[in-house]
Image (cartoon, coloured by chain):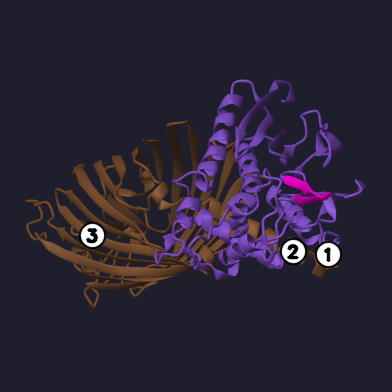
Chain colours: A purple, B brown
């Protein structure tokens, strides 16, 4: 059976990242399966991107400060419920309303925002303020925004893998900008080799052999600026509006689902400023790179 | 150590729920669709040793159904369904005692050749936490007209994991039996009506498991007899009309389980049904089906069903004496019997259309000589436009 499988490899730009689908399928079916997987990726991108005017995210944000409530489809209700659990489990640090801080933090400007700018934005932040009943939502404050960007890419990676698994694919890898799902090993049984990005230089700091599961990494190297020798990354504290001085340069987590892996890696980074060992004994495998570039692996 | 895993438990539960919700289609996502289903129903010949008189050939029914779903403004859609059926064959008439007092079937003398047409219109509406369907139907054949209506729907609670279902159905039938010179006393015009409903609850227990329970009741009133059937009274030897009480109240209860087994990539369906009516018929059925996916484009579903019912209090294959209450029926559908059926269904999907085919065999077992066995095959094609 394995002899008739061909490796199909596709790469594309989506969700602001370079994405790749690699999977083994019968020669005449690979393109068909790819189209289904790609369709799922594009539909999720269109539905949740804050850059698309017709996206759910834009429609939710359009309710800010108005009296109108937006009806939600099942999937969006599920994502919002997940966002609530993220908020609770991170003690408020993972907050999908914190995106408005982008207005103060411009990492290309090489300039720190002043306290006044931040204090004007803080009243527009706070998941607990949102008027959300499950099936309907309204953002109470004018200028409030939500952004699913913190976990929708990981969710999309799981969903694409699900599409392929349902199509009968048993050997493959989905990579959405470093959020990776391994559907199953190569048909020979060999694992896929996944590189963990070096946080301070091009290339991998560690290569992992993975047969199945998901890996996601959160790091202080994605968007940042260094001012007076201090690194200010895109990981912002929604309660203070300040950039988090993470203990780690990056945290990678291995879990059964990419959504879970990504959630743990992000919370671990956000928490590390005050609780650097938060990730320990949480029931997931992880690889941390601290600011001295020491790699600590727990599998 | 356990407490430290709270985050993993909480996030995994939320991710599971997200996956469940993500898989649920939303009404707004529905588009135009067109579907054709052709069905051939063929009753097996009556065993010769059970026959006293008439043809061993029984009913054949061919049906053609066309169904169109048209999305309307907002979260609403209209489904229009038309059915055309042709029926031919002979049907059980009455039962007489044989030489050893065994029941023998007498079949209707003439071969019946009929057509039936039916039109159904469903209006579907999705609200914030509920959905509803309003249905109207009309069916017509040479000796029978029927109108029906229904309101059904569901409310979603507990972040969509719990669903409360309901259905209210009613109908009015007008029976105007075909005149027959050999039966000048045959009824010429009768009516009957039905009104019933059920309520139920279904609960998503885990990402892969759904359970549900329903209870319901239906009231029938009017002419509930069969104008073409007779019953035999041995002492004195005479034929009387099928005559049943003009009211019937039935009660139903059902339980269902849907379990997705990821390792096998298939869904197990299990259903139990219990019903009882005040004519004395209590029935039980159990269904089990296995919907196996081969990729996401081919599905094969073998299923099996068992059924058992008790007989109506006034039923007898034939009667020794006249009854005080005047009720008589030798209809095999009111007798005590058991039945079993097996079915195989296959479904294949392409980019723009899908095909389905199924075959079923049904056998029933009991003392009535006219108990039926049949085969059904069907073929369907549907397209999302």
Q: Name the residue under label 2.
A: B7
Q: Distance between the residues labelled 3 and 1?
A: 67 Å
Indicate the position of residue B361 as horizontal and vertical percent values.
Answer: 45, 44
Q: Distance between the residues labelled 3 and 2?
A: 53 Å
Indicate the position of residue A153 as horizontal and vertical percent values.
Answer: 63, 45
Say which chain tag 1 marks: A
Q: Do labels 1 and 2 share a chain?
A: no
- Is disc 3 placed on a helix, strand or loop? strand
Q: Residue A275 carries which label?
A: 1
Q: Was residue A245 drawn as part of the magenta stretch in this picture?
A: no
**Magenta stretch in the rendered image:** A224-232
How packed mark 1 is, by other alpha carbons closer than 10 Å (few <14, some 14-19, many 20 or more), is: few
Please state if A67 lies on the left or on the right of B341 as rendered. left
Seen from the viewer's position, the closer of residues B324 and B297 is: B297
Q: Mark 3 points at which residue?
A: B148
Please state if A212 lies on the left or on the right of B222 as rendered. right
Indicate the position of residue A165 as horizontal and vertical percent values.
Answer: 64, 39
Could you tell me which residue is drawn at 62 percent across and 30 percent down?
Answer: A12
Please state if A27 lies on the left or on the right of A267 as rendered. left
């Amino acid at each position: 059976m394995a002899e008739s499988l061909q490796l199909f490899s596709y790469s594309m730009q989506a969700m602001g990242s370079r994405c790749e689908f690699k999977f083994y399928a019968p020669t005449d079916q690979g393109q068909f399966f790819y189209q289904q997987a790609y369709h799922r990726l594009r539909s999720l991108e269109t539905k949740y991107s804050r850059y698309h005017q017709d996206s759910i995210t834009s429609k939710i944000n359009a309710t800010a400060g108005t009296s109108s409530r937006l009806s939600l489809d099942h999937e969006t209700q599920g994502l919002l419920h997940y966002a609530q659990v993220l908020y609770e489990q991170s003690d408020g640090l993972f907050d999908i309303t914190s995106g408005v801080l982008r207005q103060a933090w411009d990492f290309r400007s090489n300039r720190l925002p002043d306290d006044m700018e931040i204090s004007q934005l803080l009243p527009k932040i706070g998941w607990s303020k949102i008027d959300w009943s499950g099936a309907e939502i309204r953002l109470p404050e004018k200028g409030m925004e939500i952004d699913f960007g913190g976990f929708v890419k990981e969710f999309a990676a799981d969903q694409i893998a699900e599409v392929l698994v349902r199509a009968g694919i048993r050997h493959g890898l989905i990579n959405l900008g470093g959020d990776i799902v391994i559907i199953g090993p190569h048909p020979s049984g060999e694992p896929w080799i996944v590189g963990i990005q070096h946080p301070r230089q091009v290339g991998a700091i560690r290569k992992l052999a993975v047969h199945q599961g998901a890996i996601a990494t959160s790091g202080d190297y994605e968007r940042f600026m260094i001012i007076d020798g201090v690194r200010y990354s895109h990981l912002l504290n929604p309660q203070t509006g300040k950039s988090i001085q993470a203990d780690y340069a990056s945290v990678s987590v291995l879990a059964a689902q990419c959504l879970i892996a990504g959630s743990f890696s992000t919370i671990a980074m956000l928490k590390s400023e005050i609780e650097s060992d938060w990730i320990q004994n949480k029931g997931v495998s992880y690889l941390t790179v601290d600011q001295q570039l020491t790699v600590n692996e727990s599998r | 150590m356990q407490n430290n895993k709270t985050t993993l438990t909480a996030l995994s539960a939320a991710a599971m729920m997200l996956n469940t919700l993500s898989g649920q289609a939303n009404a707004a996502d529905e588009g135009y669709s067109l579907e054709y289903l052709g069905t051939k129903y063929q009753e097996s010949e009556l065993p010769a040793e059970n026959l006293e008189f008439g043809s061993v050939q029984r009913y054949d029914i061919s049906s053609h159904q066309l169904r169109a779903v048209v999305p309307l403004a907002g979260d609403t859609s209209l489904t229009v369904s038309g059915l055309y059926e042709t029926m031919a064959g002979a049907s059980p008439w009455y039962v007489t005692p044989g030489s050893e007092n065994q029941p023998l079937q007498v079949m209707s003398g003439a071969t019946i050749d009929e057509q039936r047409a039916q039109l159904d219109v469903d209006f579907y509406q999705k609200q914030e936490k509920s959905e509803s369907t309003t249905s109207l139907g009309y069916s017509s054949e040479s000796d029978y007209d029927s109108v029906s209506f229904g309101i059904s729907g569901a409310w979603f609670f507990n972040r969509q994991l719990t669903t409360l279902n309901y259905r209210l159905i009613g109908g009015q039938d007008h029976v105007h039996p075909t005149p027959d010179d050999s039966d000048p006393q045959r009824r010429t015009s009768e009516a009957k009506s039905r009104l019933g409903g059920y309520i139920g609850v279904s609960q998503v227990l885990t990402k892969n498991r759904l359970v549900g329970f329903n209870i319901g009741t239906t009231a029938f009133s009017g002419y509930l007899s069969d104008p073409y059937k007779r019953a035999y009274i041995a002492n004195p030897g005479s034929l009387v009309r099928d005559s049943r009480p003009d009211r019937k109240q039935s009660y139903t209860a059902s339980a269902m389980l849907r379990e997705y087994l990821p390792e096998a990539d298939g869904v197990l369906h299990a259903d139990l049904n219990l019903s009882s009516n005040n004519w004395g018929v209590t029935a039980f059925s159990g269904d089990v089906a296995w919907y196996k996916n081969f990729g996401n484009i081919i599905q094969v579903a073998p299923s099996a069903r068992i059924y058992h019912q008790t007989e109506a209090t006034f039923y007898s294959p034939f009667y020794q004496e006249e009854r005080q209450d005047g009720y008589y029926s030798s209809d095999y559908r009111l007798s005590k019997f058991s039945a079993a059926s097996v079915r195989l269904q296959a479904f294949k999907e392409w980019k723009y259309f899908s095909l389905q085919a199924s075959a079923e065999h049904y056998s029933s077992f009991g003392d009535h000589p006219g108990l039926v066995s049949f085969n059904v095959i069907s073929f369907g094609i549907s397209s999302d436009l």
